[in-house]
Each structure stands twice: as structure tokens, then as C-alpha cells.
Image (cartoon, rainbow, N blue to C red):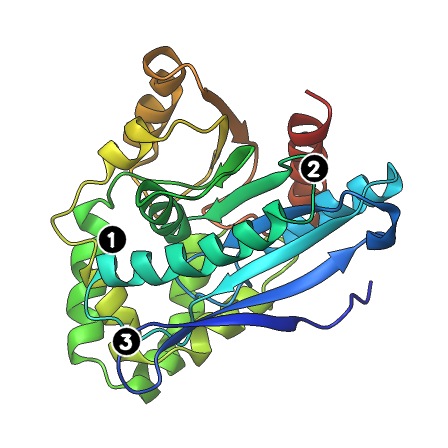
Amino acid sequence: MTFNPWQPIATEIAGPNNGKVVLRRRTYGDSKLGNTGTIFLVPGMEGSGESCVHLVEQVLLHAVEAGLAYHLDLIDYSAERCGQFDELARAVNALMRTQLALRASTVKVNSAILWAQSFGNLLALAAASLGDLQFSNAVLVSPFTNLPPWTLVPAVAATTITPTPLYRATIGPIARYLFGPAGDQPEHAFFAAMKRADAPTVHRRIAWLKGADFSSLFVRNKLETTVFLGTQDRLIDLQKQRNFFSELPYICGSYRFAEIAGSGHVVLPSNVVARAAKDIYLNLFKN
């Protein structure tokens, strides 16, 4: 299915050398009908959305069939050049804060949803914790409090010594294993996005995770939130993360925990995407 092209809406400076975060928008359904909702999407470490846009779009197709209209506002941080994670979180906060303020002046009901994928969960919640971001609820796909040494340490070491041409030549099969299973999508756009990245950028972002634990971001989050973990996620310590997120509803009543059967860290196989999209749609718009 062909969708409208992304429209750049706003830009925030994010580091030196023309580093930036860009809000890009697509609209689904007839936005002239009235109170158009918005999903603010903070993608995984590729930064440009290929890890999650395909899933969100399937959810929004269900919404359009039900007569709803939504903007999908992608927080594209692929061109950020920040030295610290907190610096990037501040840039994302500023970008979303401005757009939420504009929404508040034009809509009567707060129908802004925060959606994040993988590393984007940390970035989204860190930005939200800085204040002045009003969302109705949140969807967190493949979140983690930290990464296990068996994936983090080799990744940091490899991207330290690997030149970009070698990184791009080898990342394909590595990404398919770590982020898969890919199922019927071995050439998914996500893998192309990982291949386009340069080794220093990947290393800088991965290094922000070294020795860090982000549990407090999730505990402090007060939004009505649903967490989705893939049952075949190879990137994270799945049992540890399952224990943490399945217990959150009892610690913080605002959480709901669910699993996506057959999914890895990125939801890729077509049948898994279709099933997950229906489940997330029912959770967002029918509950």
C-alpha cells in the first residue's frame, strides 16, 4: 500500500555539525472531519523509523476503517550529533512540547499518543520526564531497562574498532539474528536503515547504554501505558525484562503488560505484524 510522503513539520538542533531532530508527519484518514488524533512515534536506534513505522501504519489502517483520522508524527533523530543521551532527550522534549502546544490550541480532546520502539522507549520517557508533555496514553514496544553484557559489550567493542565500510558489510546477518526473526521479511527496510548508519554514530548511541540502568524511567512514568515484548527477542535478557515489565502493573497501576507471539526485538514477519497491529488497535481504541 502506498502512503502519503512524509512532511517535515519542525526541526530542533541536536548537537554540533548540523545535528538535528526532525518531526515528520503523515496523515491517515480525513483530517477535515474534526478532532484528528496524533501518534508521536520515537523509533529504535536507527532513528529514522524503519524499526516501527510499518507496525504503526497497520494499526492506523484499522483506525481509518473505523472512521478515525490520525497524524503520525515521527521523531526522526537519525541526524542527531549529541554528545550525551540527556542532550538528545532535551531536544526531543523541545520538539514534542512545541507540537503538543500547537495541538492544544486546535483540538478539544487530548488524543495524543506516545509510541516508542526499543531504544526509543528510553528516549521518549526521558523526554517526557522533563515535563510539559501531555499525552493520553503510551505504547512501548520492545522496551528494556538495560542490555545484557553478551550483546552490549561486543557491540561497543566492535563499533569502536570497525571502520564504517566493514560495519556496513557485516551488519546485515548480525542484525537479522539480533533483531529477528525476520520471517518472510529478510530484506525489510529496517535492515537497510541499519546498513546506512555509520559505525561512529552507532557506537556513540550504544555507549550511552553501557553500565546504565533505566528502570527508574519506567517506574516514574504515570501515563496509561501498554508494554509489548516479543516472545523471541534475542537482543535483551528476555526473562529479566519479562519479569520487570510484568510486575510493573502491580507497582504502578498505570501499566498493562502483553507479549507478541513470534516476534523478536523488531516486529518483522508479516503475519506477526498483522496480528500485533490488531491487538494494539484494540488496546488503544477499543478499551
Q: Is residue 25 left or right of residue 27?
A: left
Quadrant where the N terminus is found in the figure = bottom right
Secondary-structure class at tag 2: loop
Label 1, label 2: how many angstroms apart (C-alpha)? 45 Å
Residue 166 in the image: x percent, y percent?
A: 31, 84
Q: Is residue 134 above or below residue 205?
A: above
Residue at mark 3: 15
Q: Residue furthest left?
A: 211
Query: Looking at the rendering, which quadrant does residue 7 occupy?
Result: bottom right
Q: Does residue 182 appear anywhere in the picture?
A: no
Q: Is residue 233 above or below residue 168?
A: above
Secondary-structure class at tag 3: loop
Marked residue nearer the N-terminal end (3 or 2): 3
Residue at mark 1: 151
> Residue at image x 35%, y 48%?
235
> Residue at image x 16%, y 75%?
160
Which mark is in front, 1 or 2?
A: 2
Residue 249 in the image: x percent, y percent?
A: 40, 16
Which mark is in front, 3 or 1?
A: 3
Residue at mark 2: 108
Callout 3, which amino acid? Gly
Residue 137 in the image: x percent, y percent?
A: 54, 32
Circle 3 crowding by C-alpha within 10 Å: few under 14, some 14–19, many from 20: some
Marked residue nearer the N-terminal end (3 or 1): 3
Secondary-structure class at tag 1: helix
Callout 2, which amino acid? Lys
Frontmost residue, 36 versus 137: 36
Label 3, label 2: how many angstroms apart (C-alpha)? 35 Å
Query: Looking at the rendering, which quadrant does residue 285 occupy?
Result: top right
> Residue at image x 82%, y 53%?
31
Circles 3 and 1: CB distance less than 8 Å? no
Frontmost residue, 273 versus 223: 223
